[in-house]
Image (spheres, rainbow, N blue to C red):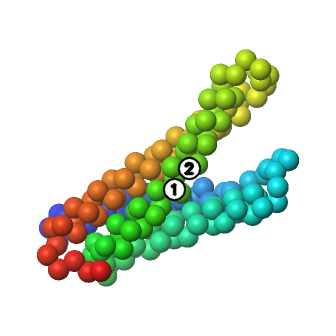
Amino acid sequence: MRFSGTRLLRVFYTIEGVLFLAYSTWRLWIKPLEFYRAPPVLEFMSRIFIGLMFVAGIFYVSRALGIMKGLFRSRSSDVIACVLSIPLWFLPALTAIGNAHTYLTSPYLPVELRPTGFYYLYVGILFIVIGCFNILSLYLSIRLLRATPNAQT
Protein backbone atom coordinates (compact mmCIF):
# COMPACT_ATOMS: atom_id res chain seq x y z
CA MET A 1 0.00 0.00 0.00
CA ARG A 2 1.54 3.27 -1.08
CA PHE A 3 1.62 6.20 1.28
CA SER A 4 -1.46 8.30 1.19
CA GLY A 5 -3.04 10.82 3.48
CA THR A 6 -5.31 8.04 4.72
CA ARG A 7 -2.62 6.67 7.01
CA LEU A 8 -1.99 10.09 8.44
CA LEU A 9 -5.74 10.59 8.90
CA ARG A 10 -5.83 7.31 10.82
CA VAL A 11 -3.12 8.58 13.17
CA PHE A 12 -4.93 11.90 13.70
CA TYR A 13 -8.22 10.12 14.38
CA THR A 14 -6.59 7.73 16.83
CA ILE A 15 -4.94 10.50 18.83
CA GLU A 16 -8.04 12.70 18.83
CA GLY A 17 -10.31 9.81 19.78
CA VAL A 18 -8.10 8.55 22.59
CA LEU A 19 -7.78 12.04 24.08
CA PHE A 20 -11.54 12.62 23.90
CA LEU A 21 -12.18 9.19 25.46
CA ALA A 22 -9.61 9.73 28.20
CA TYR A 23 -10.91 13.13 29.28
CA SER A 24 -14.59 12.19 29.08
CA THR A 25 -14.05 8.93 30.97
CA TRP A 26 -12.14 10.81 33.64
CA ARG A 27 -14.85 13.46 33.96
CA LEU A 28 -17.86 11.14 33.75
CA TRP A 29 -16.80 8.24 35.96
CA ILE A 30 -13.36 8.56 37.58
CA LYS A 31 -13.54 12.11 38.94
CA PRO A 32 -16.89 13.58 37.93
CA LEU A 33 -17.22 17.29 37.38
CA GLU A 34 -18.56 19.11 40.44
CA PHE A 35 -20.36 22.42 40.38
CA TYR A 36 -20.78 24.58 43.44
CA ARG A 37 -23.78 26.90 43.60
CA ALA A 38 -24.88 26.06 40.06
CA PRO A 39 -28.39 25.13 38.97
CA PRO A 40 -29.03 21.41 38.37
CA VAL A 41 -29.76 22.07 34.71
CA LEU A 42 -26.15 23.25 34.25
CA GLU A 43 -24.82 20.03 35.74
CA PHE A 44 -27.14 18.03 33.46
CA MET A 45 -26.00 19.99 30.40
CA SER A 46 -22.34 19.43 31.31
CA ARG A 47 -22.94 15.68 31.51
CA ILE A 48 -24.55 15.76 28.06
CA PHE A 49 -21.61 17.77 26.70
CA ILE A 50 -19.05 15.38 28.16
CA GLY A 51 -21.14 12.45 26.93
CA LEU A 52 -20.91 13.91 23.43
CA MET A 53 -17.14 14.00 23.88
CA PHE A 54 -17.25 10.31 24.76
CA VAL A 55 -19.31 9.53 21.66
CA ALA A 56 -16.91 11.57 19.50
CA GLY A 57 -13.99 9.63 20.97
CA ILE A 58 -15.64 6.32 20.11
CA PHE A 59 -16.40 7.59 16.61
CA TYR A 60 -12.83 8.68 15.93
CA VAL A 61 -11.26 5.50 17.32
CA SER A 62 -13.69 3.30 15.36
CA ARG A 63 -13.04 5.30 12.16
CA ALA A 64 -9.29 4.90 12.72
CA LEU A 65 -9.68 1.15 13.15
CA GLY A 66 -11.86 0.98 10.04
CA ILE A 67 -9.31 2.92 8.02
CA MET A 68 -6.54 0.66 9.33
CA LYS A 69 -8.38 -2.47 8.19
CA GLY A 70 -9.13 -0.90 4.82
CA LEU A 71 -12.89 -0.81 5.35
CA PHE A 72 -13.26 2.95 5.00
CA ARG A 73 -11.92 5.71 2.84
CA SER A 74 -12.25 9.39 3.48
CA ARG A 75 -15.86 10.48 3.05
CA SER A 76 -17.80 13.67 3.37
CA SER A 77 -19.05 12.43 6.76
CA ASP A 78 -15.46 12.81 8.01
CA VAL A 79 -15.57 16.51 7.18
CA ILE A 80 -18.96 16.87 8.87
CA ALA A 81 -17.73 15.03 11.99
CA CYS A 82 -14.62 17.21 12.19
CA VAL A 83 -16.68 20.39 11.90
CA LEU A 84 -19.25 19.22 14.45
CA SER A 85 -16.55 18.29 16.96
CA ILE A 86 -14.96 21.77 16.92
CA PRO A 87 -17.17 22.98 19.84
CA LEU A 88 -16.15 19.87 21.82
CA TRP A 89 -12.60 21.13 22.09
CA PHE A 90 -12.93 24.88 21.52
CA LEU A 91 -15.37 25.68 24.34
CA PRO A 92 -13.50 23.71 27.04
CA ALA A 93 -10.15 25.15 25.87
CA LEU A 94 -11.51 28.69 26.01
CA THR A 95 -13.06 28.15 29.44
CA ALA A 96 -10.00 26.42 30.90
CA ILE A 97 -7.55 29.04 29.63
CA GLY A 98 -9.82 31.79 30.94
CA ASN A 99 -10.04 30.13 34.35
CA ALA A 100 -6.27 29.62 34.38
CA HIS A 101 -5.75 33.30 33.63
CA THR A 102 -8.07 34.27 36.48
CA TYR A 103 -6.46 31.93 39.02
CA LEU A 104 -2.88 32.77 38.04
CA THR A 105 -3.11 36.54 37.65
CA SER A 106 -5.80 37.79 40.01
CA PRO A 107 -4.36 39.58 43.05
CA TYR A 108 -7.60 38.92 44.95
CA LEU A 109 -7.29 35.14 45.02
CA PRO A 110 -5.19 33.50 47.72
CA VAL A 111 -1.85 31.97 46.76
CA GLU A 112 -3.15 28.55 47.85
CA LEU A 113 -5.38 28.50 44.77
CA ARG A 114 -2.49 28.80 42.28
CA PRO A 115 -2.28 25.00 41.75
CA THR A 116 -5.90 25.17 40.57
CA GLY A 117 -4.80 27.70 37.97
CA PHE A 118 -2.10 25.36 36.72
CA TYR A 119 -4.63 22.54 36.59
CA TYR A 120 -6.86 24.68 34.36
CA LEU A 121 -3.84 25.58 32.24
CA TYR A 122 -3.03 21.89 31.68
CA VAL A 123 -6.63 21.13 30.76
CA GLY A 124 -6.63 24.06 28.34
CA ILE A 125 -3.43 22.81 26.72
CA LEU A 126 -4.96 19.32 26.41
CA PHE A 127 -7.94 20.71 24.53
CA ILE A 128 -5.72 22.88 22.35
CA VAL A 129 -3.78 19.74 21.37
CA ILE A 130 -7.07 17.98 20.59
CA GLY A 131 -8.04 21.02 18.53
CA CYS A 132 -4.81 20.91 16.56
CA PHE A 133 -5.44 17.30 15.61
CA ASN A 134 -9.06 18.13 14.80
CA ILE A 135 -8.08 20.97 12.46
CA LEU A 136 -5.40 18.80 10.83
CA SER A 137 -7.99 16.00 10.38
CA LEU A 138 -10.40 18.48 8.83
CA TYR A 139 -7.78 19.76 6.42
CA LEU A 140 -6.67 16.25 5.48
CA SER A 141 -10.26 15.02 5.06
CA ILE A 142 -11.02 17.88 2.68
CA ARG A 143 -7.80 17.25 0.79
CA LEU A 144 -8.54 13.53 0.46
CA LEU A 145 -12.09 14.25 -0.71
CA ARG A 146 -10.83 16.60 -3.39
CA ALA A 147 -8.24 14.05 -4.53
CA THR A 148 -10.77 11.22 -4.81
CA PRO A 149 -12.93 11.61 -7.92
CA ASN A 150 -15.66 9.24 -6.68
CA ALA A 151 -15.81 10.26 -3.04
CA GLN A 152 -18.36 8.40 -1.01
CA THR A 153 -21.09 10.40 0.68
Q: Is residue 106 above or below residue 133?
A: above
Left or right for 151, reference 59: left
Quarter residue 74 falls in: bottom left
- Describe the element under mark 1 as helix, strand or loop: helix
Location of residue 25 in the rendering, given as x and y in whole percent from the top left corner:
64, 62
Q: Which amino acid type corresponds to the residue marked 1 in the rendered image?
A: Pro
Quick one: SS at disc 2? helix
Question: Is residue 64 at all visible to an observer of this figure?
Answer: no
Number of the label disc, if any, that sits on residue 42? none
Q: Is residue 56 left or right of residue 8?
A: right
Type of the residue with mark 2: Leu
What residue do we see at 37% from left, 53% from top? 135
What residue is rendered at 53% in x and 57% in y?
88
Image position, residue 94 (x, y; %): 56, 42
Residue placed under numbered mark 1 in the picture: 87
- Mark 1 in CB contact with mark 2 (< 8 angstroms): yes
> Does 119 sit left or right of 14 as displayed?
right
Task: Estimate the spatial distance between the alpha carbons at disc 1 and disc 2, rounded to whole Å.
Answer: 6 Å
Say which residue appears at 55% left-offset and 70% top-offset: 55
Mark 2 closeness class: few <14, some 14–19, many ≥20 residues within 10 Å: few
Q: Quadrant of the image for the N terminus?
A: bottom left
Relative placement, left or right, of 122 versus 67 is right
Judge whether residue 102 can be spotted in this image: yes
Foreground pick, 78 / 42: 42
Residue on which the image places disc 2 = 91
**Where's residue 44, x and y in %?**
75, 64
Nearer the observer, 40 or 56: 40
